[in-house]
Structures are given as C-alpha cells and as structure tokens.
Image: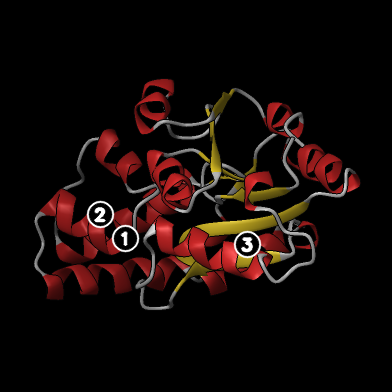
Amino acid sequence: MYRYFLFDLDGTLTKSEKGIFNCIKYALDWAGIPYPDEAVFRSFIGPSLYDSFTDKFNMDNDMALKMVAKYRERYNVTGLFENEVYDGVYDMLESLKAKGCTLAVATSKPTEPTLRILDKFGLSTYFDVVVGSNPDGTGSEKKLIISAVVEKLQKLDGFDKSAAVMVGDRFYDIEGGKACGIDTVGVLYGYGSEEEFRGAGATHIVARPCDVEKLG
C-alpha cells in the first residue's frame, strides 16, 4: 500500500472542462480563429497551453504566447472557478489523510491559480505539497513537476519512493511518474481512457475515487 499520493488537478480532483473550453474560445474569438471540434478542445486538458496552441493550431512562438496570455486574461478571473470537484474526491482525501498518508498536488497548471482553486473548493487543507508550473507557463513538463514534488517529499522523515504513487487522468501523468521512478494510477472518471493508460504502462487503472482510496 502507498503512503505518499501525488495528484494531478484537472480531470483528477476537479472536473474543469467548462472553464478551460470557455477560455480557449475567448482566445480564439480574439484571434478570429474558428472553433475546432470537441476532441481538440479536450486535448488541451493535460499538456501546457503553449504546446497545445502550437500543436493543434500550427502557431509560431509569438502567436502561441499571445494566445496563452489571452486565455489567462479570462481564466485567472473567471475560468478557474468554472469548475467542480468530482463526486467522491472529498471522501477519498479525507480517508487517505485519516490513514496517515501524505498528499501532494503535481499539476502542469501554474501554481498561483492552482492554489486559488484548492482554496476555493476547500481542498487546500488536504495537501502538504503543491507544485505547478511557472507563471509564464514554463516548467510545465510533467516529469519536472513530479520530480519537484518528490524532491520536497524526500525532505520528510521516512520518505520511501517505493511508497509513492502518481494519480492522474492522462498519459502525461503516467509517463511522468514512471520517469521519476514511482508507481502510477490512471483514473477513468477523468479525461483519459483505459487504452491510453495501458499504452503508457500505468501500474493501476481505477474507475472511481474510492478505488484510489483503497490503495492507501
């Protein structure tokens, strides 16, 4: 059983597509770009905004940076709260803490809005460590984020990497955890699929938050 749980945010703790999609549309409207199909919108959940705009819309560096800035213009005021905590997440976190587990957030979202979301939805009290990307969106690679969390956890007495696990809803979370030498959990209630998790080599694949709880 695990004692240290690292959680992704979007698609793992919170259902966030409404705010994300609305902010993508806000940026696209500003640029005069027609909306893509829903699959493209959903692909934005997980990787960095910069990478998504460059990959999905073939934007150059300057335009992608402008789109990220425009996205955040709305997101940092309104979009981050167009969000809801998945059913069962509070109970899962409460149970893991009661078992003596140490909990952390490892997200590609910038740290400042992450902290605001955790505070807004009453989640911040559960987490001992929170690591996100830089304000300008750099440092968002999942391996770097997870590595930073592990580094902070290693300062705690008795930390054992073999007792740590990364919980997420996309293959980025699984690949990042593996690259850092820790086990991984893919959650099917988020935005990823069983095929995606198996292809990435997830240690565990679960359907509900209560299934994560059982790993503690």
Name the residue nearer the viewer: 12 or 162. 162
Q: Are marks 2 and 1 in contact (CB under 8 Å)?
A: yes
Residue 109 position, x and y percent, is 46, 62
Q: What residue sits right under mark 3 in the picture?
A: 117
Q: Amino acid at mark 1?
A: Leu
- Rounded to the nearest angstrom, the CA distance separating label 2 from label 1 is 5 Å
Q: Residues within 10 Å of mark 1 (few under 14, many from 20)?
A: many
Q: What residue sits right under mark 2 in the picture?
A: 52
Residue 106 position, x and y percent, is 55, 58
> Residue 40 vs residue 215: left or right?
left
Q: Amino acid at mark 2?
A: Ser
Q: Amino acid at mark 3?
A: Ile
Q: Is residue 21 visible?
A: yes
Residue, far right: 98
Residue 35 position, x and y percent, is 21, 45
Which quarter of the picture shows residue 151?
bottom right
Q: SS class of the residue under badge 1? A: helix
Which quarter of the picture shows residue 129?
bottom right
Residue at (72%, 54%) from the top-left corner?
A: 103
> Residue 108 vs residue 97: left or right?
left
Q: SS class of the residue under badge 3? A: helix
